[in-house]
């Protein structure tokens, strides 16, 4: 195998790996796929692709690969998507398009190759041969101007093109290839540098039936007859990119003299930092040579128009749409201009460029005369030299839409505007309406659309009454966005209960759904509460929305931009979102705590619900455990102090003599020693005793039995072994006995017999504290006494026990006698 063949295979493998990575990144990380029925639209803008992705659906009809790093289109690049209709490859680094790159694209109608590095050497004559249905070709902003050669031979096969976006350059030759576009109707020229437009520039295009012409480039020398070849022209756009004065550009209209056109757009024609322009007689004369329905003269630094010349403009009666926005007209002259257009329906005077003017003052009212044909007047961002309240329109007008939004800060709603009885649409956004005139809308009974953004309505007490919109029974669309509203009430729209269909409350401070409004408005179709402070919807709010939806399938709500919380406390709300059709922008909702789209969360909602249930039971189990622990602690404390309570509440039994000499407390494991050893000795000594199996009443509590036995005995004898301390029951009994036995006056009336070796620390606290008074007796046995001395030790034990018992009995008897004497 040759070296070249080896390199070729290596490069092929590299390309395949690269394509695989790109497709993986594209499909999962960058490209957006929109499906509609069986077709798909794929957008891969800015994905840094260096090759065409291969994993697209065969039925893809739109592919946008703009803003990537494509350099070469190889043969068969789009073979997997033969049904493509729209293809955009703009803003790449394309310099070569191989023959066969567009094979199999027989359905392609729109191709965008703009903003690349293409020149006349980038194509072969057969490059576009398979594009039989191509209608729009966008190929401007490439490198054709560098060598000033256009690849006309390449376009000989594109006979069905009707729209072309192309670069133009000085000396450009419109030859056979260009003239082959016999169906061309829309022609748009671009150029990065300066270009002179001469009378001969477009002469070769005279036989073509061009309907729309656009010129986007810096114009140099302009000859007035340059546009004469376009006698069929219906629309003209001329933008000199702020390089040529409007007074010079207007001269080109002479080439279209006596033409009747649909629109002329002359925008951004002024010299930067050149100041304002005054249109004189000659300038208006050029305008008067063409009859056009729509005239766009925006952003041309026009400061004024010669009044005398303006009145001689006979063709101004053709104009139905006039755009003079982004200029520097003063309001007096604008209002004078308005009435001089007898057929105008729409006038745009918006966005006046800032110039110093002295604001007129006075108490007089300035009346504005409008053409009877005028329907729409746009004065947004057009600072008046008159106050709002001093501006009124002469009653004899048919104005339906008025936009006076975003005026000077001093422009307020504090006065009434007259002469607007036919108004159906009114925009007062940006105007201070914190103290509105109560009857500012009283004459606008036909009003159906009101836009009042950023009007400080939250500061107006009048807004929360039924006065402001009173009588506006046709009002169907209200926009109250960005007014810092925290609440709404039903009084505001009392007269609109049967008319209001759209209510926009975007960018406010609402924390709850405006339920009172919803309960009153019966025909509402759209409620937009986007970008508020709503974290969730309650069950009552959900029920109201569902009721609305059941009454009207058109009813929808927008919730996007709210800080919605997606936690286990809002399961009902999230579950409702999963099934409802009320929320219009469901795909845009985001969980504020995780920044995840809710639609993504709903895809695994079952698992989320299970986790919440598990979390719930975990919390319940922890709570139960804590409660049990607390109850255990409380029980232990109560149990601990219950002994004291029993002692405090027990009435001591008074005896002159006691029924028993001793009360014996012992463990049942030691009952054998008690019966065989201790009891016989007690009987031999003629001593009476009390014990559990002898004197306890089975109907009483163990504690009462113990305390009763102690009260009936001179002394208490504790027979203690290791078994005695092992059982809680015995420890409890011992605690009761010791606590009660060692009460005041009976500290010496207790005897402890130790059957085993037991440390002092193992005894209850009360016994440890009285250890010196007790002096326990140890029972001798083979574990602690020598066998030869066992009998002697036990004899000594019995003598000590007898002595202790008798001595204690005498002491207690003596104490009782002294108390009875007292």
Image: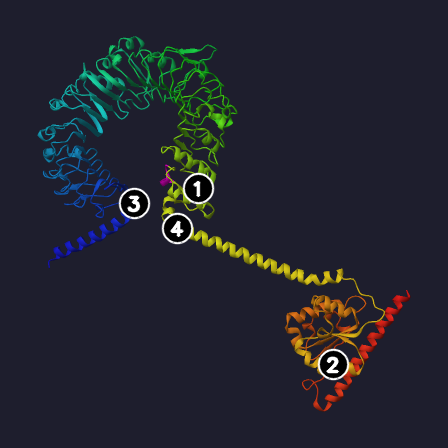
Quadrant placement of the N terminus: bottom left
- Identify which residue, 698 or 419, lies in the foreground: 698
Q: What stretch is highlighted in magenta?
A: 584-588
Label 3 or label 1, whichever comes before in sequence order: 3
Cα–Cα gap, marks 3 and 1: 26 Å
Element assignment for label 2: helix
Determine which residue is flagged by label 3. 30
Mark number for residue 564?
A: 1
Between disc 4 and disc 3, the foreground one is: 4
Between disc 4 and disc 2, the foreground one is: 2
Cα–Cα gap, marks 4 and 3: 28 Å
Evaluate whether residue 764 shows in this view: no
Residue at the (49%, 32%) spot, across then down: 487
Determine which residue is flagged by label 2. 678
Find out whether the residues at labels 4 and 3 contact each other: C-beta distance under 8 Å.
no
Q: Position of residue 734 (x, y in %)?
A: 70, 70
Against 755, residue 215 (above or below) is above
- Identify which residue, 680 or 592, lies in the foreground: 680
The figure's colour scheme reads rainbow
Label 4 or label 3, whichever comes before in sequence order: 3
Against 759, residue 4 (above or below) is above
Label 1 or label 4, whichever comes before in sequence order: 1
Label 4 or label 2, whichever comes before in sequence order: 4
Element assignment for label 4: helix
Evaluate whether residue 458 shows in this view: yes
Could you classify mark 1 by the number of other residues whose Cα lies within 10 Å: few (under 14), some (14-19), or many (20 or more)?
many
Determine which residue is flagged by label 4. 606
């Amino acid at each position: 195998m040759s070296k070249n063949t080896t390199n070729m295979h290596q490069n092929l493998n590299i390309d395949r790996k690269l394509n695989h990575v790109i497709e993986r990144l594209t499909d999962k990380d960058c490209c957006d796929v929109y499906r509609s029925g069986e077709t798909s639209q794929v957008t891969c803008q800015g994905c840094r692709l260096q090759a065409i992705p291969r994993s697209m659906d065969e039925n893809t009809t739109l592919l946008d690969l703009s803003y990537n790093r494509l350099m070469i289109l190889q043969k068969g690049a789009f073979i997997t998507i033969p049904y493509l209709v729209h293809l955009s490859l703009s803003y790449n680094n394309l310099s070569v398009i191989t023959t066969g790159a567009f094979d199999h694209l027989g359905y392609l109608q729109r191709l965008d190759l703009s903003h690349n590095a293409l020149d006349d050497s980038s194509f072969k004559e057969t490059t576009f041969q398979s594009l039989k249905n191509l209608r729009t070709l966008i190929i401007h902003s490439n490198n054709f101007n560098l060598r000033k050669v256009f690849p006309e031979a390449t376009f000989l096969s594109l006979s069905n093109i009707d729209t072309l976006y192309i670069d133009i350059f000085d000396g450009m030759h419109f030859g056979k290839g260009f003239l082959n576009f016999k169906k061309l109707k829309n022609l748009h020229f671009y150029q990065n540098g300066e270009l002179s437009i001469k009378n001969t520039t477009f002469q070769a295009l005279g036989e073509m039936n061009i309907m729309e012409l656009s010129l986007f480039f810096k114009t140099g020398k302009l000859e007035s007859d340059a546009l004469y070849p376009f006698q069929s022209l219906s629309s003209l756009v001329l933008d000199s990119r702020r390089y040529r004065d409007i007074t010079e550009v207007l001269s080109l209209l002479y080439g279209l003299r006596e033409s009747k056109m649909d629109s002329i757009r002359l925008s951004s024609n002024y010299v930067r930092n050149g100041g304002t322009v005054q249109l004189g007689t000659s300038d208006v004369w050029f305008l008067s040579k063409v009859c056009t329905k729509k005239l766009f003269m925006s952003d041309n630094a026009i400061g004024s128009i010669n009044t005398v010349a303006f009145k001689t403009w006979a063709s101004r009666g053709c104009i139905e749409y006039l755009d003079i926005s982004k200029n520097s007209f003063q309001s007096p002259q604008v209002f004078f201009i308005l009435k001089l257009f007898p057929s105008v329906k729409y006038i745009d005077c918006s966005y006046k460029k800032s110039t110093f003017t002295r604001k007129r003052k006075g108490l007089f009212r300035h009346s504005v005369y409008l053409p009877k044909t005028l329907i729409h007047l746009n004065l947004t961002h057009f600072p008046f030299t008159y106050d709002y309240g001093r501006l009124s329109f002469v009653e004899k007008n048919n104005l339906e839409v008025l936009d006076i939004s975003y005026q000077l800060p001093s422009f307020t709603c504090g006065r009434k505007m007259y002469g607007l009885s036919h108004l159906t649409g009114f925009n007062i956004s940006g105007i201070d309406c914190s103290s509105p005139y109560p009857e500012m809308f009283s004459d606008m009974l036909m009003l159906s659309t009101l836009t009042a953004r950023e009007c400080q309505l939250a500061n107006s007490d009048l807004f929360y009454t039924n006065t402001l919109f009173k009588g506006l029974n046709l009002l169907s669309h209200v926009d109250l966005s960005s007014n810092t509203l925290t609440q709404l009430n039903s009084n505001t729209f009392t007269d609109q209960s049967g008319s209001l269909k759209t209510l926009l409350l975007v960018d406010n401070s609402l924390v709850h759904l405006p339920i009172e409004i919803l309960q009153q408005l019966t025909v509402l179709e759209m409620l937009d509460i986007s970008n508020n402070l709503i974290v969730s919807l309650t069950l009552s709010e959900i029920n109201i929305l569902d009721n609305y939806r059941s009454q009207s399938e058109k009813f929808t709500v927008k919730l996007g931009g709210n800080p919605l919380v997606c936690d286990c406390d809002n399961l009902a709300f999230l579950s409702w979102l999963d099934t409802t059709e009320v929320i219009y922008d469901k795909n845009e909702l985001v969980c504020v705590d995780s920044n995840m789209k809710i639609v993504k969360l709903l895809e695994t909602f079952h698992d989320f619900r299970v986790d919440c249930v598990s979390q719930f039971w975990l919390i319940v189990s922890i709570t139960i455990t804590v409660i049990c622990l607390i109850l255990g602690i409380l029980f232990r404390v109560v149990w601990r102090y219950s002994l004291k309570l029993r002692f405090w509440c027990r009435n001591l039994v008074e005896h002159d003599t006691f029924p028993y000499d001793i009360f014996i407390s012992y463990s049942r494991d030691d009952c054998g020693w008690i019966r065989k050893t201790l009891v016989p000795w007690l009987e031999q000594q003629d001593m009476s005793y009390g014990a559990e199996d002898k004197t306890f009443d089975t109907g009483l509590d163990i504690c009462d039995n113990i305390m009763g036995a102690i009260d009936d005995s001179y002394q208490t004898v504790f027979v203690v072994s290791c078994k005695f301390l092992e059982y809680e029951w015995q420890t409890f009994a011992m605690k009761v006995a010791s606590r009660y036995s060692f009460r005041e006056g009976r500290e010496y009336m207790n005897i402890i017999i130790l059957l085993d070796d037991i440390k002092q620390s193992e005894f209850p606290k009360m016994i440890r504290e009285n250890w010196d008074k007790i002096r326990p007796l140890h029972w001798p046995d083979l574990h602690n006494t020598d066998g030869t001395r066992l009998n002697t030790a036990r004899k000594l034990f019995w003598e000590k026990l007898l002595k202790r018992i008798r001595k204690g009995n005498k002491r207690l008897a003596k104490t009782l006698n002294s108390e009875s004497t007292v």
